C-alpha cells in the first residue's frame, strides 16, 4: 500500500510558512471593504453589503484531498466522497456557521462509473443530512484529487475566530483526539482490519463534522478552531492568533479505548497531540460560560474535555502530574 505521511516527516518548507510568505501578507492589503476575515482562520468571512450590518455574513471554506496524500489508493470511494465534504464542514463548524452550498472540482485519471457512483453516494449522504446543496464545479483528467468549497452563513459579525481567546479562559476539546490518526496507521499497515479496530478506521474514513456543537457554542466561546493538523499544532495556531499562551494537562485528554488498548501510553498521547485529521473542535471559553457549555454538551454525540487554561504568557506548557511533558513540535505537514 502507498505509504502515508507520518507525524514526524522532516519539512524544509511547511504549509503555513508557504501561505504566509506568498499569499497572506499580500492579502492583508485589503482591496475590498466587504472582506471581514481573509486568509488565516478556518474560513473566510465576507459581507454582501458592508453598509448594512443587519444582513448575515457569508462564510467560505475550501479544502483539497489528493490520493496518496490524504487517502490511500485502496480507500473506498464512498469514504472519499464523505471526507471531501466533511473536512470543509468542520471549518464551517469552527466559525459557528450554518453550511448552505458546495461546489466541487474533481480530477480523475479515467472515468470509472462504479467508483463515481460510490463517491457520489458518500458525498450526498452527508450533504443531505447537513442541508448542503451542490451547486456546481468542474471535472478534469489528471491524478485523483477533489477540491470542495462550502459556503455558509453566520449572523453579521458573529463568526467565531481563532483570535479571541482571553487570559483565564478554559480550553476544551471535543471527541477523542488521536483516534483518526490511529485509524490511518492501521489502514496503512494492514491488508484487512479485524472487527476490533474497524471503529478506529472509521474515525479516519468518516469524520463527523461538529456542526451542532459549533452553532451552540457560537454565543458562548471567545475563540475556536477545528483540529485538522493535530491538537498541539492547532492549539498553537489559536494561541498565536490570540497572542496568548496556555497551561495544559495531558491526563485530561479523552482517548479512544481502541487507542489506549492498541498503542503504548506514549504513542497514544503523541497520536492525540500530533496525529491530525480528527476534525474535532478546540475552543476557549470564559469561566462564566462553562456551566452552560456543560449543559449543552449533554445533548452532543461526542465527549468533551477541559484540557487547560489560557495564560498571558506566550508559552505553551503541557504537564503530566507534577512533571513537564515535552510534546513534539509537529503536526500534519503537506511539505
Image (cartoon, grey):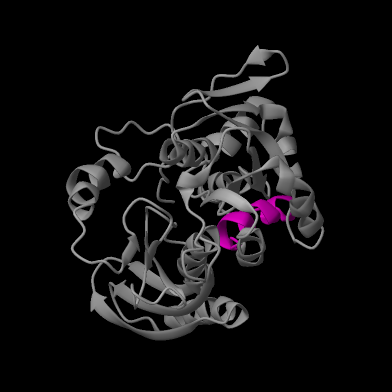
Question: Can you see residue 190?
Answer: no
Q: Which residues are magenta?
A: 192-209
For the residue pair 284 and 53, the one nearer the viewer reads as: 53
Residue drawn at 63 percent across, 46 percent down: 179
Q: Residue furthest top?
A: 323
In the rendered structure, the answer to whether residue 9 lies left or right of residue 284 reads left
Instruction: Give the image location of residue 237, x and y in percent.
Output: 44, 40
Instruction: Give the image location of residue 235, x and y in percent.
Output: 51, 38
Snapshot quadrant of residue 50: bottom left
Snapshot quadrant of residue 111: bottom left
In the rendered structure, the answer to whether residue 296 lies left or right of residue 165 reads right
For the residue pair 150 and 8, the one nearer the viewer reads as: 150
Residue drawn at 81 percent across, 56 percent down: 295
Residue drawn at 59 percent across, 47 percent down: 283
Reply above or below: 23 against 153.
Answer: above
Instruction: Give the image location of residue 7, x and y in percent.
Output: 45, 36
Instruction: Give the image location of residue 271, x and y in percent.
Output: 57, 37
In the rendered image, residue 327 lying in the magenta stretch gets the answer no
Reply above or below: 17 against 302.
Answer: above
Looking at the rendered structure, the number of numbered marks drawn on it comes to 0
For the residue pair 21 and 103, the one nearer the viewer reads as: 21
Location of the C terminus (image quadrant): top left
Residue drawn at 46 percent across, 39 percent down: 242
Q: Examine the residues drawn in magenta and state their main secondary structure.
A: helix
Question: Can you see residue 73?
Answer: yes
Amino acid at each position: 500500500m502507498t505509504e502515508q505521511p507520518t507525524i514526524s516527516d522532516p519539512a524544509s518548507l511547511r504549509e503555513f510558512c508557504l501561505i504566509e510568505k506568498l499569499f497572506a501578507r499580500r492579502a492583508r492589503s485589503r482591496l475590498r471593504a466587504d472582506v471581514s476575515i481573509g486568509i488565516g482562520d478556518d474560513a473566510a468571512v465576507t459581507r454582501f453589503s458592508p453598509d448594512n450590518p443587519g444582513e448575515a455574513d457569508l462564510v467560505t471554506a475550501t479544502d483539497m484531498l489528493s490520493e496518496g496524500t490524504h487517502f490511500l489508493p485502496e480507500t473506498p470511494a464512498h469514504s472519499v466522497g464523505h471526507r471531501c465534504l466533511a473536512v470543509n464542514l468542520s471549518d464551517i463548524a469552527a466559525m459557528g456557521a450554518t453550511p448552505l452550498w458546495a461546489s466541487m472540482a474533481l480530477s480523475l485519471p479515467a472515468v470509472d462509473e462504479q467508483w463515481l457512483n460510490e463517491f457520489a453516494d458518500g458525498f450526498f449522504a452527508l450533504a443531505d443530512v447537513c442541508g448542503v446543496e451542490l451547486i456546481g464545479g468542474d471535472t478534469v483528467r489528471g491524478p485523483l484529487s477533489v477540491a470542495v468549497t462550502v459556503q455558509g452563513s453566520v449572523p453579521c459579525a458573529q463568526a467565531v475566530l481563532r483570535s479571541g481567546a482571553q487570559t483565564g479562559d478554559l480550553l476544551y476539546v471535543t471527541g477523542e483526539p488521536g483516534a483518526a490518526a490511529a485509524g490511518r496507521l492501521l489502514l496503512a499497515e494492514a491488508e484487512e482490519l479485524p472487527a476490533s479496530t474497524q471503529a478506529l478506521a472509521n474515525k479516519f474514513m468518516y469524520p463527523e463534522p461538529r456542526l451542532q456543537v459549533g452553532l451552540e457554542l457560537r454565543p458562548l466561546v471567545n475563540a475556536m478552531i477545528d483540529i485538522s493538523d493535530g491538537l498541539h499544532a492547532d492549539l498553537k495556531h489559536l494561541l498565536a492568533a490570540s497572542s496568548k499562551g496556555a497551561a495544559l494537562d495531558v491526563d485530561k485528554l479523552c482517548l479512544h479505548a481502541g487507542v489506549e488498548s492498541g498503542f503504548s501510553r506514549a504513542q497514544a498521547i503523541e497520536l492525540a497531540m500530533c496525529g491530525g485529521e480528527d476534525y474535532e473542535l478546540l475552543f476557549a471559553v470564559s469561566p462564566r460560560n462553562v456551566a452552560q457549555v456543560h449543559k449543552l454538551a449533554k445533548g452532543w454525540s461526542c465527549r468533551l474535555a477541559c484540557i487547560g487554561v489560557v495564560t498571558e504568557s506566550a508559552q505553551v506548557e503541557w504537564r503530566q502530574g507534577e512533571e513537564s511533558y515535552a510534546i513534539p513540535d509537529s503536526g500534519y505537514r503537506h511539505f
